[in-house]
Image (cartoon, grey):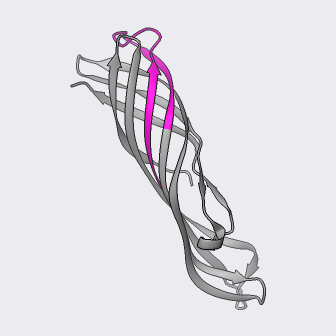
Amino acid sequence: FSGFSFGGEWLYGIGDFIEAGVGVNYYQKTVPSLYRDFVDVDGTEILQDLKLRVLPITATVRFLPIGRAAPVQPYVGAGIGFFIWRYTESGEFVDFSDGTIFRDRYSADGTAVGPVVLGGVRFPIGDAMTTGVEFRWQKADGDTDPAESRLIAPKIDLGGWTTSWNLHFRF
């Protein structure tokens, strides 16, 4: 489920070397899937669409070792993320008890909580803007409740790495 996300973050300076932030991002991706070892009786592939939507809401603290007024501003930080998610599988499926193929849609949704670790560098553009790049790692697992949702996996990995280009406006 690699893809693009977008969002915004409000940062508040606490002195010259610390910032606290609250942010919201949005990610959604649909990927095609098929059974590797099974085909329909007419030889066609058995296809599904897998869709994941995640809305991470994060609270972070950043440390800027050379300060917020420097011409180059590296930073590291950490925080906590609240992940609102929905996962869906739709298309054709195989009932392995009798070999029949049927169409259906299965979904699961929920919220998860996990750590966020980040680092980056930014560069001032005049007095009111900065631009830069950030690397972010987050970890969270969503419980899919296979008995209720009929999905096979009991958990879905909502974490991973994100690389983002940032544009900051100072108010």
| 129 sits to left or right of 67 | left
Q: How many marks?
A: 0
Residue 151 x/y as whole percent: 64, 70
User: Residue at 51% across / 62% down in the picture?
Assistant: 109
Point out the stretch of residues depicted in magenta: 53-80
User: Residue at 39% across / 45% down in the picture?
Assistant: 6
Residue 94 x/y as whole percent: 70, 82
Residue 101 x/y as whole percent: 67, 87
User: Residue at 48% across / 24% down in the picture?
Assistant: 120
Would residue 87 be counted in the magenta stretch? no
Q: Is residue 48 above or below residue 28?
A: below
Considering the whole magenta stretch, tell me its main secondary structure: strand
Question: Which sits in the foreground, 137 or 83?
Answer: 83
Residue 53 x/y as whole percent: 47, 58
Q: Is residue 146 above or below residue 6?
A: below
**Quadrant where the image shows the C terminus:** top left
**Quadrant where the image shows the N terminus:** bottom right
| 70 sits to left or right of 39 | left
Q: Is residue 143 above or below residue 5?
A: below
User: Residue at 23% across / 16% down in the picture?
Assistant: 127
Question: Which sits in the foreground, 63 or 33?
Answer: 63
**Residue 87 appearing in the image:** no
Q: Outermost residue toward the left?
A: 171
**Residue 42 appearing in the image:** yes
Would residue 77 be counted in the magenta stretch? yes
